[in-house]
Amino acid sequence: MRRNAVLFVAVSLLSGLGGSAMALVCGIWILDLTGSTGLAALAGLCVYAPALAGPWLGGLLDRVPRRPLVIGVNLVLAAALLSLLAVRGPGEAWLIYAVSLAYGIGYVLVDAGETALLPAALPPARLADVNGWRSSAQEGVKLVAPLAGAGLYAWRGGHVVAVLAAVVPVLVAVLYGALRLTRTVPAPPAARLAGVRDGLAALLARRAVRVPVALAAVSIAMSGFTTAALYDVVVTGLGLPSTFLGVLAGAQGGGSLLAGLVVGRLVRRHGEIAVGAAGTVLFAAGCLGRCLPWWPGTVAASVMIGVGLPWTLVAAVTAVQTYTPQAMLGRVAGTANTAMFGPITLAIPLGSAAVAAGGRPPLVLAAVACLAAALAVVRPRRQPAAGGPDRWRISSGRERSRSFR
């Protein structure tokens, strides 16, 4: 299965390269065409908004063959990117929005598709490792892809970036075609006809799944809630130039890269819930560290956040892959993606409003919310012996021997 593991990591590298570069270039392109920062920001909204339709989009993966659908989505994305060659002035800016929306829909389908394909291509014991490696690949690419995309745009313009970005999904489609799926389980007719409600019920049915997903949702939402607060802390609190945010982004990216290399081992040893809770606590500690009036502390806090966020995400994705029946994996993965990434669309504007009270209060509030979520998964377990003392533990969620219910 080493071949499949390498292919999945290569897919993550290529997808992160093209997606990260185009996400920035689309906004810059619209800004140059229209001169409006507000219109430029709408390109990002087009990318994130389709996450709210995750349960319905993920349901497609349970109704049609998954690999052909994912390959087809990538080829459609390549064609959509080439349509940007028609952009010549402000009158064609709508094409950039349309491509951004197509990217957003494609992200949802491909993310859910990868989540569903991984268990069919890898043994269960390797899922956490490969998810961690994929996370490291994506975070590593994010350190260079936006800068490379912006530099290429400044040098040769948006058309060249669009053409090069269109090559990426074609290569990704080829890599998907090279996968060896040894455990494909076709969905029975009843499961194919089941609706979104069944996917949500499956997501909530087991504590081993719903708890890691909830922890990831809280952490990711709070990362969006504190975006504006970080800007305020750096510029107003620390009196540093806004370019220092690039240093913090690099520190967070470095932490995420390292986190992905070790998270698989931690999940195998301690379970998805424990790793998700640990990542949430690390994120909370990082939020509090960003409140320090000392820039090295802020850098160290960014590294902690860079470690914590991928831990929560990888733990949640691995839990979904491990405990969900193959016939429902597309729907459940799409629902989980909506649960984890949907709240950030509301958290970002709320955080922007909350920063009116200063940068540090939203960071403290986010830390409290994350700590409360982590503490909520701690539960008492009584000893078998009569009168024995209660012991507190974080459930590891290792329930693989039980049937799905």
Image (cartoon, rainbow, N blue to C red):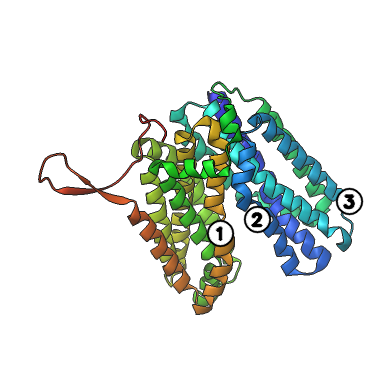
Q: Residues within 10 Å of mark 3 (few under 14, many from 20)?
A: few
Q: Residues within 10 Å of mark 2 (few under 14, many from 20)?
A: some
Q: Earlier in the sequence, mark 2 or mark 3?
A: 2
Q: Residue at x 77, y 56 (%)?
A: 97
What residue is shown with label 3?
86
Mark 3 vs 1, N-terminal side = 3
Report the amino acid beneath label 1. Answer: Ile
Q: Secondary structure at mark 3?
A: helix
Q: Amino acid at mark 3?
A: Ala
* Residue placed most toward the observer, 16 or 338: 338
Q: What label sits on residue 49 in the rendered view?
A: 2
Question: Residue 344, labelled with which disc?
Answer: 1
Q: Quadrant of residue 58?
A: top right
What percent of the width, then of the height, locates residue 319?
45, 39
Element at label 2: helix
Q: Residue at the location (39% across, 41% down)?
A: 208
Is 186 positioned to the left or the right of 321 in the image? Answer: right
